[in-house]
């Protein structure tokens, strides 16, 4: 299975105090999508419950956007985000 085709983007920044990851998108991502965060041997899955673009609530982000998503676990810089 080719994992690259499911890659949505990469985490460019993680705010640990508020549990938010900033993701630079390579593909469209919508609220309600189930995604997997992977870095090294660490990975977790979750559903996107909300996202922000430039501090405004949005229901989806497109290629090139840097969106902020609340995450359930730590997602350090460079973490790969893919669709489940």
Image (cartoon, rainbow, N blue to C red):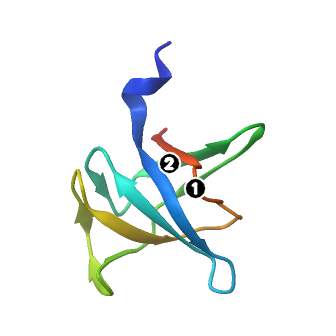
* Image spot of residue 53 (x, y percent): 29, 76
Residue 48 at what x, y percent from top left?
A: 45, 62
Query: Residue at (33%, 87%) from the top-left corner?
Result: 55
Say whether residue 34 is left or right of residue 17: left
The residue that mark 2 highlights is 35
Q: Which residue is mark 1?
A: 46
Q: Nearer the viewer, residue 21 or 13?
A: 13
Element marked by disc 1? strand
Q: Nearer the viewer, residue 6 or 33?
A: 6
Residue at screen point 46% across, 16% down: 2
Of marks 2 and 1, which one's residue comes earlier in the chain?
A: 2
Name the residue at 30% across, 58% down: 30
- Label 2: state its secondary structure: strand
Q: Quadrant of residue 59?
A: bottom left
Which residue occupies the foreground of this view, 45 or 38?
38
**In the visual, does 75 lie left or right of 84?**
right
Between residues 44 and 14, which one lies in front from this camera angle?
14
């Amino acid at each position: 299975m080719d994992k690259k085709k499911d890659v949505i983007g990469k985490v460019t920044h993680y705010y640990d105090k508020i549990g938010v990851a900033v993701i630079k998108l390579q593909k469209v991502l919508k609220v309600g999508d189930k995604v997997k965060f992977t870095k090294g041997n660490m990975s977790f899955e979750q559903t996107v419950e909300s996202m922000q673009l430039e501090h405004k609530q949005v229901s989806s982000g497109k290629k090139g956007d840097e969106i902020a998503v609340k995450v359930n676990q730590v997602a350090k810089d460079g973490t790969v985000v893919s669709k489940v």
